[in-house]
Amino acid sequence: MAAGEVAASGPAIATAREERRTSFAEPVTFALSIAAALAFWEVISRTGVISQRDLPAMSTTFQELWELMKTGHFWWAFADTVRGWGLGLAFATAFAVPIGIALGSNDFAASAFRIPIEFLRPIPSAALIPLLFLTLGTTLKSELFLASFGAFWPLLIQTIYGVRDVDPVSVETARSFGVGRLERLYRITLPSSVPYIATGLRISSTVSLILAFTAELFMGTKGLGQEMNAAQSFGLEVQVYALALATGFLGIAIHLVFTTLERRALRWHPSQRLGTT
Amino acid sequence: MAILEINQLGKVYGTGAKATHALADVSFSVEDGEFVCVVGPSGCGKTTLLKCVAGLLRPTRGDIVLRGKRVTGSPEELAVVFQEYGRSLMPWMSVRNNVVLPLRHKKLSRSERDGLVENALEAVGLTRFIDHYPWQLSGGMQQRVAIARALAYQPTILLMDEPFASVDAQTRGELEDLVLRVWDEYGVTILFVTHDIDESVYLADRVIVLTHAPTEVKEIVQVDLSRPRDQITTKELPEFVHLRGHVYRLIKRELPVPV
Amino acid sequence: MPIAILLAWQLWTAHLDSPKFPTLWTILVTFRDLWLFSQFGTHVVPSLERIGMGFGIAVVVGIALGIPLGLSRWARLWAMPHIEYWRAMPPPALLPISIVLLHSIGNRQKVAFIGFFCLFPVLLNTIDGVRGIDPALIETARAYNVPRLERIRRLVLPAAAPQIAAGMRTSLSLAVITMVLSEYFSSTSGVGYVLLISKNTFDFKPMWAAIVLIGLLGYLLNVLFLIVERRLLAWHRGWRAVAPA
């Protein structure tokens, strides 16, 4: 369950030749492109192609966002969402990585648990919203459960892949040198799986954000989602748009952080491989 | 007039301090129906030369004239067989569809197209495999498909870029003879790039020996061995041994370190 | 193993004897009552329709945009800031907006919502797939003067197909999720709507039946997709089996 992600079959290796030619044109087109889109938004709204009631003008929305950012209330909600997201991701990682390693290194366990995993995995966490609402209520606990549950699966799958993908030659070499099982795990398997885990984290970080926000929007747990829900029920359209904008920025920030992390892990990985063989 | 003229061809990659002068000044011509081989030390820009002739790269100086017209893009009457046969065949197409692909945009009737395909595959001995997929064939067979594709296209001139470099030695001999047979049958002009000196002398009417980068033509060696050629008897001829030695010495002198 | 789990589930819920966690048996009974036939048309069909249409639009637009973007670096430079922004946006954040903007809570809004977010996996994978095409293939086609449209149809599309299929699979599971979210948020029909109603009436049985149905739906759609993919991309498996990656 991952929004906009490439299939989880391995680290996202840069396709084709990485465009290293950082010409002057790149940042300029980047800025121009955004500016053009914002201008387009402004024009569409101001000229009434889409009525301002439905789509507030770009300037109005950004102004509203600015006003919101001046209030402490907004930042509390923002922090709440980040907290829900962070803890959800943390719990998911704490469970997925160890279990993933266990399942990845033990063939028997892997085949035994394969069917339950295949059954539970496709259950969209979104479907669990009413269940959580009625059992755990509108507390942080619901949000955390939802976010962790959703984020758990991609990370688990990636970790299993990563552990399985370890170069058997490295492992055999270590074994022939009498390196103990735990140390083999620590020195060879884990470092070798890091890129996969990094990819899993990237996917899971997105999932966790989506679910944390969903919990807030639908269940009313504190956070940006709940703010949006409230704004909508009070008919404050502009605020709804401003909050959507803010949420988008949060999404990008998280995406950037974890994509960079993933890229670093990938860059580091091949040389690590060479080191062990 | 020669069918192909290469005039003072030059190609430089990159600019300034990091510029690589692949080709400096290469000039030669090819007559209609000739079999010309190009050899040179490793890295002398043989592939660059071929890509320029094929219109896949734009030269930095000089020009290429094919049948009286300057080459700017990919000429219609030209076909190329690359070294990486596996990577030049489309894996999702059968042998038949791979061979017919270049013919689709030509104004031919369906039966004409099919006829060309079948004839070409017969010429390379792969009629049985017409509906197989590339991954089901061996390396040598895949290269034969690439050759058949070039033949079906009925080009005026056929460029071959070290086509047998990745094939094992025995298959290479078979393929060399196949090319000679096909050249004789179809009457096509062939420009054949190779690093294998024996191969170049065995196949060619003339061998163009290149210098190392920045590349120029070192010498053009006339090969007057009788045809049809044979892998065993031709290579036993004193004339062959002499020519081969001559080309080898020319190239050895081009190598940076005494071998 | 799975049997053991199901058995354990049944026993545990029977032991718990709580209305919140009905036994497996009860769930299955409710499932049969609800979905098999009586409510199928009222709820399952609209949901499937929305998934179908949203997914369909996403695939068509994703591939149609992805191919030119994959081929042109210049186009990518202009489009990337926007693609990156919208793909990072959590879908639920746009739910209220989608209703306001499109003046509807019916199929128009749902399909647009689903289609919009399902676009990105397909689009991004198409771009990656096109960019990753072996240059040797492209050079060969160029050397033989294969015209541009033919190149796209016979070379670019099949070559990128495996990657596009992977994106489509992700998109399909995303379609199920966005369908549930949009129906749960505001709707008058559909599986998500049933979820919503059961929450409001505190009725756990249809809720669990719906959860099971949604999981099953996702699973079945995925299996169906894999079957189709397997047939169409048979060449790819054969090719990968022999060629070093």
Image: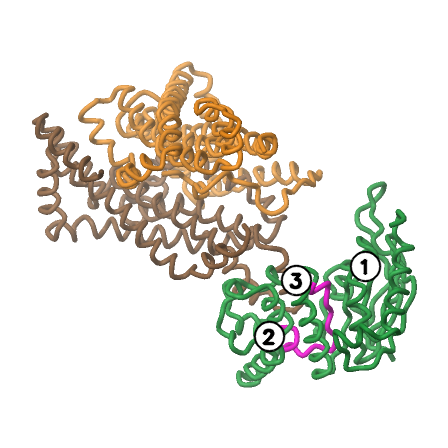
Q: Nearer the viewer, residue A143 or B100?
A: B100
Tell me the colour chain C is drawn in.
Answer: brown
Identify the image quadrant of the C terminus of chain A. Answer: top right
* Nearest to the observer: residue B211 or residue B30: B211
- The reply to the same-chain question for discs 2 and 1 is yes
- What amino acid does circle 3 point to? Asp
Q: Name the residue under label 2.
A: B105
- Among the chains pictured, the one given orange colouring is A
Marks 3, 1 in one chain: yes
In percent of width and height, residue B216 lies at: 89, 59
The CA span between labels 3 and 1 is 33 Å
Q: Looking at the image, which residue is at 66% across and 38% down?
A: A28
On what subunit does the disc labeled 2 rest? B
**Side of B99 relative to C57 (left or right):** right
Colour green belongs to chain: B
Residue A36 placement: quadrant: top right
Query: What's the chain of the residue with tag 3?
Result: B
What span is colored magenta in the figure?
B149-164
Check residue C156 for magenta coloring. no
Residue identifier under label 1: B59
Query: Whole-percent x and y of residue B32?
Result: 81, 80
Residue, disc 3: B168
Residue B15 in the image: state x and y as whole percent: 82, 45
Instruction: Indicate yes or no whether the magenta region holds residue B160.
Output: yes
Q: Which residue lies furthest to the top in this view?
A: A72
**SS class, disc 2:** loop
* Element class at badge 3: loop
Q: Dividing the picture into quarters, in which one does residue C148 lie?
A: bottom right
- Tag 3 or tag 2, which sits nearer the N-term? 2
Kind of residue at disc 2: His
* Badge 2: residue crowd in 10 Å (few <14, some 14–19, many ≥20): few
Q: How packed is label 1: few (under 14 Cα within 10 Å), some, or many (20 or more)?
A: many
